[in-house]
Amino acid sequence: MRGLFTIKQLKTEQIYEIIEYAEKLKKGLRVSYPDKKIATLFFENSTRTHYSFQCALLNLGIKVLDFNTETSSVKKGESLYDTVRTFESFGVDGVIIRHSEDEYFKELEGVEMPIWNAGDGKANHPTQCLLDLMTIYEEYGKFEGLKCCIIGDISHSRVAHTNIEIMERLGMEVYISGPEEYNDGSAKWIPVDEAVKNMDVVMLLRVQFERHTEKMSMSIEEYHEKYGLTVKRMEMMKKNAIIMHPGPINRGVEMASEVCECEKSRYFKQITNGVYVRMAVISKVLDGEL
Ligand code: NCD
């Protein structure tokens, strides 16, 4: 199958090439694919990833078909495979898919057009990971030796699972923190107050209630107090350390509203970088380089 499914499929040098290409696009490099049309198939709610992919397609001169699961034949029981094969039969040049099933793409064996994974269940979110890496690289010009702690609902997060593997591969020290009930052992666990004092990157996650089978053991006020990035904790961070969050933010839960707006926050920059990283991976797949 062609496309971008996981970060694991990318060699380390390909990751650097994507970031460099995204930087060139950000600086104004123009690339155009006026004869192409690509469909966005989002089976889960999304604002950033969905419309960032659409902006990337429009910036590349590609026509966008936006699939609405609510008014589609998915409601009549049509499978993901048959939906994707339908778009392929229309003659579209590729599809961008988000789905709640881990590794949904394994069901799509036989599809020949490119597929870009916009997030699968709790498993992978390769373009979010690339935009996070681009944002860190813009800040520090390297990955080697940097310390990052991901704080929050680790066990339900495809962002955490994707980032931990690649950050370690790139030479970063990665830690996790937050409520013990979300510790899945995917990296070394440290207390929140230790994390905020020592990290170069503090990455917060939303509590992903829609993925929970059991109710959280505390109120959101208690969560904020114990594990949230409050103004007080933000003031404990190293001078040049940065704050990241994949969005959507629940202000006052995982981070105080003022913290989102503070000078250490790269939240809105991450969103901007997402458009360029997605332009880069769309172009590279269409050009046969990925
Ligand atoms: C995340 C996701 O959907 O995986 N958001 C995103 O894509 N920017 C994280 C989340 O929903 O909390």
Image (tube, helix red, strand yellow):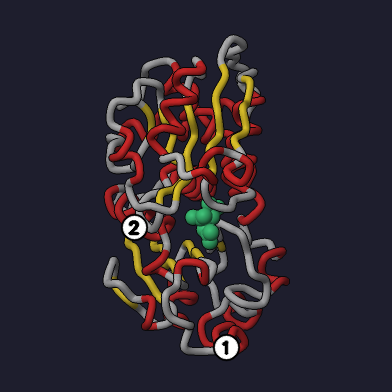
Label of residue 219 in the image? 1
Label of residue 99 in the image? none
Of discs 2 and 1, which sits in the foreground?
Answer: 1
* Residue 9 placement: quadrant: top left
* Residue 33 placement: quadrant: top right
Question: Percent x, y for residue 7?
Answer: 34, 42
Residue found 56% across the figure and 63% down from its top: 243
Residue found 65% across the figure and 33% down from its top: 55
Question: Percent x, y for residue 261?
Answer: 72, 63
Q: Is residue 145 visible to us here?
A: no
Residue found 35% across the figure and 45% down from its top: 104
Quadrant of the drawing holding the C terminus:
top left
Whichever of labels 2 and 1 marks the residue nearer the N terminus, that label is: 2
Q: Residues within 10 Å of mark 1 (few under 14, many from 20)?
A: few
How far apart are the two marked residues, 2 and 1, measured between alpha carbons?
28 Å
Q: Which residue is mark 2?
A: 164
SS assignment at label 2: helix
Q: Amino acid at mark 2?
A: Ile
Question: Percent x, y for residue 166?
Answer: 32, 49
Q: Relative to the observer, which residue lies in front, 31 or 125?
A: 125
Question: Percent x, y for residue 158?
Answer: 40, 56
